[in-house]
Image (spheres, rainbow, N blue to C red):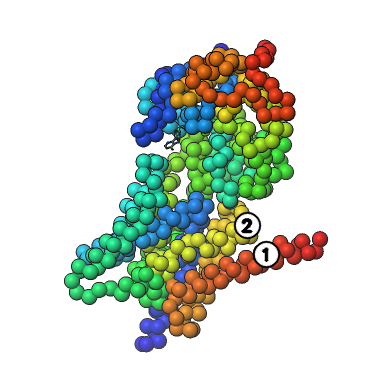
Amino acid sequence: MQKLVELKNVTAGYENEIAIENADFSVYEHDFIGIIGPNGGGKTTLLKVMLGLQRPWKGSVEYYLDGGGQNLIGQMGYLPQINKFDDKFPVSVYEVVRSGLATPKKLFSRFSKEDNTRILETLQDLGISHLKEKSIGELSGGQKQRVFLARAIVSEPKLLFLDEPNTYVDNKFEAELYEMLHYLNQRMAIVLVSHDLGTISAYIKSIVCVNKSVHYHDSNTISEEQLSVYNCPIQLITHGTIPHTVLKSHSHE
Amino acid sequence: MNNLLEFGYLTNSLLAAVFAAISCGLIGTYIVSRRMVFVSGGLTHASFGGIGIGHFFGINPIIGAAVFSVIAALGIEKFSNRRLVRQDSVIAMLWSLGMALGIIFIYITPGYSPNLMSYLFGSILTVSSLDIWFLGILSLVSIIVFSVMYKVILYVSFDEDFARTRNLPVQTVKYLMISLVALAIVFNIRVVGIILVLSLLTVPQSIANLFTNKYQNILIFSVLTGLVGTLSGLAAAWLLNIPSGATIVFVLILMFFLASGVKWLQNHGKKALI
Ligand SMILES: Nc1ncnc2c1ncn2[C@@H]1O[C@H](COP(=O)(O)OP(=O)(O)O)[C@@H](O)[C@H]1O
Ligand SMILES: [Mg+2]
């Protein structure tokens, strides 16, 4: 399998405070990694480092995507944590999704017909065509997550990063989301951040525990003992109607 | 002769009103959408330091203020990502530091002191040709920047991190825009003054935002609303012989309340019909 990104002993943080330490793992084609950890544990920071938004203090992040790591445009999709958005921002759904196709070259020219088709298809795939002209502030939590997912995948990235796409959504949407991701996973590797393991454990292939220290766990199941070894205090039980623990094993092809 | 002079004043103030509406309509949209009103308030008051320093060294105070504010603006933008010091506290300091420096420098300058009231509350009826040039060029630059860079400004404003993942020139855009904000503030001080300039940069946008939430429409509608506000304010000030800056701001805010009323009627009228 082709390696896409490799973190080599990465430490990163803010001002004088370390946020993540010794992150040392790789993401391969068709991977589906769940990043878990407590609030403030450094999950978002880890994603930002992998996306190249934040420079590591120590260690390095190496890319093996086409173009040898230099030209990564369009090859990494990103769905940021939703709480940072301004609800009143005057921008339409169509425009938001279109920003997912922006490149420095295209900034001064018009978007092409193919781009338009691509946007409409993505909106259709995610079942939000009818929201096209709505402004982002008029949407529900679940609709917003779909729009941001559309923006993240409209460029057909090889690697998709999602930061807590399951917050502010109901259980029904969460289930649909995981089905969509399962389907997308056939064409792209996915790295998904979640504050608990919940139902995602059925879809992911490996787990990264982040609580300042970063541990890679090459399985989609994890026990209480392992979590305590990783110093990663999170909930194992879902909030759904049928409580199920991740100790149950799931078969993956 | 007297008539000709008066005619000159009138065209100058008309031009100032038009350019104020254009520059503030466009740049104010950036301020409002990014929720930078407090930063802009800080820059407005900081610019008074530049006015004082300019006065002391015998350069045009507006040029002094422009240089001072642009430097302050770039500094704020550069350090805005750090959490080490709270950004709002820094801005509050800059806010009062500017005012303090302004007063001190004007006080220690030998000779006559400038009419402070005209800086605090503006005097569109006495703007100089140089002021008009500054405002005119700024308006032209704003129109060009917003038409050529519309997309990147929108994307960077909405979600900086995402724009970075698309390799867009985020930092460059932010520096360019904050410099334009600083210049818009300084050049419009001649029109409505330090105390009131913020409303020229935010009220038209608030009115526009009542009726549309498309960025592009807000840009255009803010300029038009601003034009109505500055021109009718100017006319009212001229006719009633009252201070122009205050009148313009008063008219704009009156327009906001009228527009809110119309909006309310629109919403409730619809409901009543159903
Ligand atoms: N911009 C920032 N400046 C300073 N500290 C930050 C910043 N962003 C996050 N942090 C700190 O870094 C730590 C990790 O944060 P984050 O990666 O957001 O955690 P998580 O996503 O797991 O909740 C927290 O202690 C947080 O307060
Ligand atoms: Mg987070």
The tally of labels here is 2
Q: Which amino acid does label 1 sit on?
A: Trp
Q: x and y percent of residue A107 in the render?
A: 51, 42
Q: Quadrant of residue A126?
A: top right
Q: x and y percent of residue B82 in the render?
A: 38, 41
Q: Which mark is residue B212?
A: 2
Asked if the residue under mark 1 is in contact with the one under mark 2, i.e. CB atoms within 8 Å, the reply is no
Q: Is residue B146 above or below residue A235?
A: below
Q: Which mark is residue A38?
A: none
Q: x and y percent of residue A151 in the render?
A: 60, 36
**B248 vs A245, nearest the viewer:** A245
Which residue is situated farthest in the bottom direction here?
B2
Q: For this view, does A217 lie left or right of residue B54?
A: right
Residue sitting at x 71%, y 64%:
B266
Q: For this view, does A41 lie left or right of residue B104?
A: right
Residue sitting at x 61%, y 60%:
B210
Local packing at callout 1 (Cα closer than 10 Å; few below 14, some 14-19, many 20+) is: few
